[in-house]
Amino acid sequence: QVQLTESGPGLVHPSETLSLTCTVSGFSLTGYSVYWVRQPSGKGLEWMGRMRYNGDTSYNSALKSRLSISRDTSKNQVFLKMNSLQTDDTGTYYCTRARRGTRAVMDAWGQGASVTVSS
Amino acid sequence: DVQMTQSPYNLAASPGESVSINCKASKSISKYLAWYQQKPGKANKLLIYDGSTLQSGIPSRFSGSGSGTDFTLTIRSLEPEDFGLYYCQQHNEYPYTFGAGTKLELK
């Protein structure tokens, strides 16, 4: 059974760094790409970036200067770090699995990690 | 970036009815359009990709159509579990962008 579970601090102070972990089960990180998507409070979905199955990364240019995605395949984990957080970064952060054979189609989602940026 | 415009923003319908949700891209995305369902307390669900391909396990009352810039998600004979939020997403080019969502509510 495919599962993705996001974890991390629920509260981050302005200007600090957000660190989130996506722990996956039911599939291998060397066989599937994992994407991060966020949903600012009351708004729609925004694709943030991806960790490809081969270890390559790509980022949304709007976030690229602040964002880093890495992984530990031995622990089945993908990590997101985003610095210089502001209040409009408040929202829910999802990790997703990319469907094989199709570009950027997300066939499994975590439940999401709620992040509040506040002093 | 490709802008995705969904309509309507809100949609009220009754079980058994059929509804359509539209998604318009700011430039051609060929067939590369996906639809997702979002419901409180549940993981988002992929419904359709490549414009019209039904994801495995999704009921056949869901269908997608369109290409280029104009796409439609149709749900025939609504079931109670179909009410929720629906998002389109273009998966043609970086950055992959989503529509603002359509809230399908019980009339």
Image: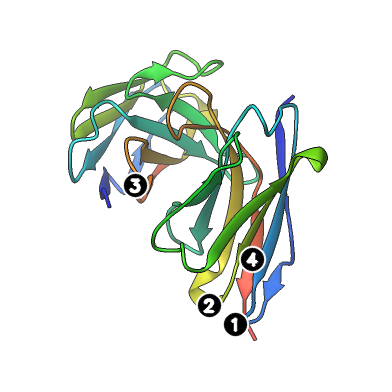
Question: Residue A115's mark?
Answer: 4
Q: Quadrant of residue B102?
A: top left
One can see residue B51 in this view: yes
The alpha-carbon separation of the residues under discs 2 and 1 comes to: 7 Å
Mark earlier in primary sequence (2, 1): 1
User: For numbered disc 3, what is the local secondary structure?
Assistant: loop
Dot 2 amino acid type: Thr
The alpha-carbon separation of the residues under discs 4 and 3 comes to: 22 Å
User: For numbered disc 1, what is the local secondary structure?
Assistant: loop
Q: Quadrant of residue B14?
A: top left
Residue in front for this viewpoint, A39 or A23: A23
Position of A61 with respect to A119 (left or right) is: left
User: The disc numbered 4 marks a residue on which chain?
Assistant: A
Question: Residue A53's mark?
Answer: none
Q: What is the quadrant of the N terminus of chain A in the image?
A: top right
User: The disc numbered 2 marks a residue on which chain?
Assistant: A
Residue in front for this viewpoint, A55 or A29: A55
Q: Quadrant of residue B96?
A: top left
**CB of mark 3 within 8 Å of CB of mark 1?**
no
User: For numbered disc 2, what is the local secondary structure?
Assistant: helix
The alpha-carbon separation of the residues under discs 2 and 4 comes to: 10 Å
Residue found 53% across the figure and 16% down from its top? B56
Q: Which residue position is annotated with label 2?
A: A87
Residue found 64% across the figure and 79% down from its top? A16
Percent from the top left, x then y, of residue B53? 39, 17
Q: Residues within 10 Å of mark 4 (few under 14, many from 20)?
A: many
Colour scheme of the picture? rainbow
Q: Which residue position is annotated with label 3?
A: B99
Question: Residue A14's mark?
Answer: 1
User: For numbered disc 4, what is the local secondary structure?
Assistant: strand
**CB of mark 2 within 8 Å of CB of mark 1?**
yes
